[in-house]
């Protein structure tokens, strides 16, 4: 569940920012000849609704119905008491309650005589919700994932600014970790504390405890740390998700080299394009690339792998998180950084 | 080990029900069905476990990072990463032909799976799996007992971190840091800060603790997949007379609910015992759904599992269930108040798991955040 700070912050993501997103989606809905689009949300599949409303549920689930015009409607089985909290943290949609949110969606669609409804990730929609909708209205359902992704792929300044802010929190939080820690949890506990003290909404930590043996990440805090280890911090701040991986060593000579590589990545990454081409990304001189992948917000997923060595990027993304694994001076290094954070206008000019 | 025990029970239940296969869905919110079969604590994306009656379990995940983690954390389970999860699993199910296959949980099963199954249809596995989730084995109960220790220690951290001037999310940061150090996988936690204006709990809103505030929390650490909950309320400064009086009512309600717990009673009996205390004090309105959700619930691989403790739920309580009894609700004089303890249902009554004293904790108002 989400149990970090969830708050409407007009100075970081304004009502106007969100309304502009809603207007772009509504224009696409009309252009596609649909009566509306339905987006599912829970705290795992939160990204679609967060983008269109600024809201993330901490628990349970819900639907956002975006019609061609008017305020989107958040349909939820959550109680009216929780509904008051929802309104306080997201003043960007109407909140409607029912033990059967799908039925409520059907009723709203029936009111406007809807015939064609797009559903983001139709295949993944909980079957019970679809049953509820069609029990009220024989509406034609179609998959609206591509439509949504094409609109969502356009970055806006508010989002890029939040991603930069989130990455700043992540970078600073790593300073709280002690590279001499014996166990993974000894390192990750203080980092998570720092992330949450900075007002993060969510934080997941994982560790590859000994890079000389294995590059795979695990969540157990009880793993003993090796000579070099990597820590993956996945965090959300005000709805913006960032993943940041840093490699550490308790051996001071190696540690100094790793710090220097990390700083170089920080300087180079934000301005690099999130276009799925590895050739554009920074690698230290002498490094031998082992593996890479690019993640980005996609549909209802906050971050999803959208390109790697075998798969090219299918659609534009608002920003990306590039993860690389490489060998430098005999040491395996894993790193993740946000990319594609250059100002939108500058990006458009460059393209 | 515990995963193997669960798998054996699951297969036996399938065979008893005459099923050839089971398809179980999960995500980080609703993970109990998936975890029961595959013993994986999914965090990102979604997963499906396909179980056949000959004991084969395959875990299908749509997230590469989670697939990588599963290969380390549950190597005994065959894991497949499939970016098109629905198509891949539908193909697997299709190859099973027209055998009897059940799926669950029914409400959350992805639409695309059922649509591709077409006229063959899935049978509903919800009741079969819910029963396994509710009535636990000795090993599962031992895991729950282990988690209870961390619920108590977590509340002590929470209590010691509370101070005038501290923000609600800063309190949660202390808890989470402690839990990560202790290897706790997850924690369900909501909080309330203030007085009569507070009508429930939610994630933190950035409220600053001040003298006189009630600070409520539900703390629910998850250890090896099993959740245990504790609910307590503390006061910043010395509790006033109204706060003391109300605490007495909630404590009586909790004790009344616990006194009823034993095999053979119903969930409704427990709820009624709690609610009768409120009604005796003229507070019957505040035990309705307008002000409170449930009077307790099951605990296990999900922090809010069946049975829900409500006056209209007639599920029979059985030995081997784990529950929390919590008469949490709004009080018009002092605001939202919580008080609850986790337990295991034993043959002769409840074994109370959480050991934190049942008292209205007070934090010295001179304790100020650094």
Image (spheres, helix red, strand yellow):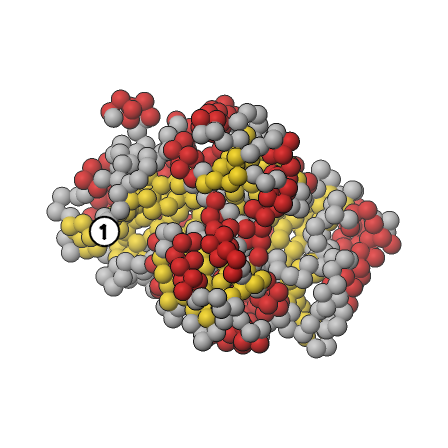
Q: Is residue A117 left or right of residue B304?
A: left
- Check the image and report above or below for B222 versus B334: below
- Check the image and report above or below for A159 versus B341: above
In the image, farthest residue toward the left: A286
In the image, farthest residue toward the front: B119
Question: Mark 1 — on which chain does it sit?
Answer: A
Q: Position of residue A6 (x, y in %)?
A: 53, 39
Q: Which residue is depicted at the point 75% across and 66% down? A: B266
Q: Which residue is depicted at the point 13% across and 43% down? A: A285
Q: Secondary structure at mark 1?
A: strand
- Check the image and report above or below for A198 versus B102: above
Q: Which residue is depicted at the point 32% across and 22% down? A: A345
Could you classify mark 1 by the number of other residues whose Cα lies within 10 Å: few (under 14), some (14-19), or many (20 or more)? few
Q: Quadrant of residue B72?
A: bottom left
Tell how many labels: 1
Residue placed most toward the observer, A269 or B53 = B53
Q: Is residue B153 left or right of residue A349?
A: right
Q: Which residue is depicted at the point 51% across and 74% down? A: B11
Q: Position of residue B285 (x, y in %)?
A: 82, 46
The answer to whether residue A150 shows anywhere in this view is yes
The answer to whether residue B113 shows anywhere in this view is no
Tag 1 residue: A291
Residue placed most toward the observer, A58 or A131 = A131
Residue placed most toward the observer, B13 or A228 = B13
Q: Quadrant of residue B204?
A: top right
Q: Position of residue A264 (x, y in %)?
A: 22, 39
Q: Position of residue B208 (x, y in %)?
A: 59, 38
């Amino acid at each position: 569940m989400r149990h970090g700070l969830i708050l409407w912050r007009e100075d970081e993501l304004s009502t106007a920012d969100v309304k502009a997103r809603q207007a772009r989606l509504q224009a696409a809905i009309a252009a596609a000849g649909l009566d509306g689009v339905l987006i599912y949300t829970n705290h795992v599949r939160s990204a679609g609704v967060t983008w269109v409303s600024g809201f993330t549920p901490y628990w349970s689930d819900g639907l956002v119905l975006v019609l061609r015009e008017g305020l989107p409607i958040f349909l939820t089985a959550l109680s009216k008491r929780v509904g008051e909290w929802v309104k306080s943290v997201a003043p960007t949609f109407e909140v409607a309650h029912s033990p059967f949110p799908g039925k409520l969606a059907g009723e709203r669609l029936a009111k406007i005589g809807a015939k064609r409804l797009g559903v983001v990730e139709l295949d993944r929609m909980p079957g019970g919700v679809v049953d509820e909708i069609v029990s009220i209205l024989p509406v034609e359902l179609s998959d609206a994932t591509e439509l949504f992704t094409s609109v969502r792929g356009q970055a806006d300044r508010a989002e890029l600014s939040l991603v930069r802010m989130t990455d700043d929190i992540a970078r600073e939080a790593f300073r709280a970790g002690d590279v001499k820690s014996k166990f993974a949890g000894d390192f990750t506990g203080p980092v998570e504390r720092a992330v949450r003290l900075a007002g993060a909404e969510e934080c997941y930590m994982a560790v590859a405890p000994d890079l000389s043996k294995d590059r795979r990440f695990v969540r157990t805090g009880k793993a003993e740390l090796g000579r070099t280890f990597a820590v993956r911090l996945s965090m959300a701040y005000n709805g913006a998700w960032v993943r940041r991986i840093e490699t550490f060593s308790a051996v001071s000579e190696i540690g100094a080299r790793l710090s220097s590589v990390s700083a170089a990545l920080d300087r180079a990454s934000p301005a690099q394009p999130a276009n799925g081409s590895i050739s554009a990304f920074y690698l230290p001189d002498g490094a031998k690339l082992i593996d890479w992948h690019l993640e980005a917000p996609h549909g209802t997923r906050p971050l999803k792998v959208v390109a790697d060595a075998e798969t090219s990027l299918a659609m534009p993304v608002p920003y990306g998180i590039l993860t690389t694994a490489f060998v430098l001076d005999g040491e395996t290094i894993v790193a993740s950084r946000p990319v594609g954070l250059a100002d939108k206008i500058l990006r458009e000019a460059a393209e | 080990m515990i995963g193997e025990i669960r798998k054996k029970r699951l297969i036996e239940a399938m065979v008893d029900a005459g099923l050839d296969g089971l398809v179980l869905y999960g995500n980080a919110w609703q993970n109990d069905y998936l975890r029961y079969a595959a013993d994986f604590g999914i965090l990102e994306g979604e997963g499906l476990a396909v179980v056949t009656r000959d004991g084969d379990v395959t875990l299908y995940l749509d997230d590469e990072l989670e697939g990588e983690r599963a290969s380390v954390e549950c190597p005994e389970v065959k894991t497949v990463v499939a970016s098109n999860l629905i198509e891949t699993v539908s193909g697997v199910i299709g190859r099973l032909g027209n055998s009897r296959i059940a799926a669950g949980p029914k409400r959350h099963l992805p639409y695309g799976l059922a649509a591709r199954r077409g006229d063959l249809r899935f049978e509903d596995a919800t009741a079969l799996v819910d029963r396994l989730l509710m009535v636990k084995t000795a090993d599962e109960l031992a895991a729950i007992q282990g988690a209870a220790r961390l619920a108590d220690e977590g509340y002590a951290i929470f209590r010691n971190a509370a101070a005038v001037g501290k923000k609600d999310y800063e309190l949660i940061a202390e808890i989470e840091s402690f839990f990560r150090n202790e290897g706790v996988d997850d924690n369900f936690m909501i909080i309330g800060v203030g007085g009569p204006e507070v009508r429930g709990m939610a994630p933190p809103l950035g409220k600053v603790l001040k003298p006189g505030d009630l600070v409520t929390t539900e703390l629910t650490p998850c250890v090896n997949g099993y959740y245990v909950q504790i609910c307590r309320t503390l006061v910043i400064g010395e509790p006033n007379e109204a706060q003391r009086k109300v605490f007495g009512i909630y404590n009586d309600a909790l004790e009344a609910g616990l006194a009823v717990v034993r095999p053979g009673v119903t969930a409704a009996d427990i709820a009624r015992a709690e609610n009768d205390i409120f009604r005796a004090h003229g507070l019957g309105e505040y035990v309705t759904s307008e002000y409170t959700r449930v009077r307790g619930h099951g605990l296990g691989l999900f922090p809010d599992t069946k049975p829900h403790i409500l006056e209209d739920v007639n599920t029979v309580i059985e030995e081997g269930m784990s529950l929390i009894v919590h008469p949490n609700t709004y009080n018009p004089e002092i605001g939202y108040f919580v008080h609850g303890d986790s337990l295991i249902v034993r043959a002769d009554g409840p074994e109370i798991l959480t050991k934190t004293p049942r008292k209205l904790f007070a934090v010295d108002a001179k304790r100020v955040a650094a």
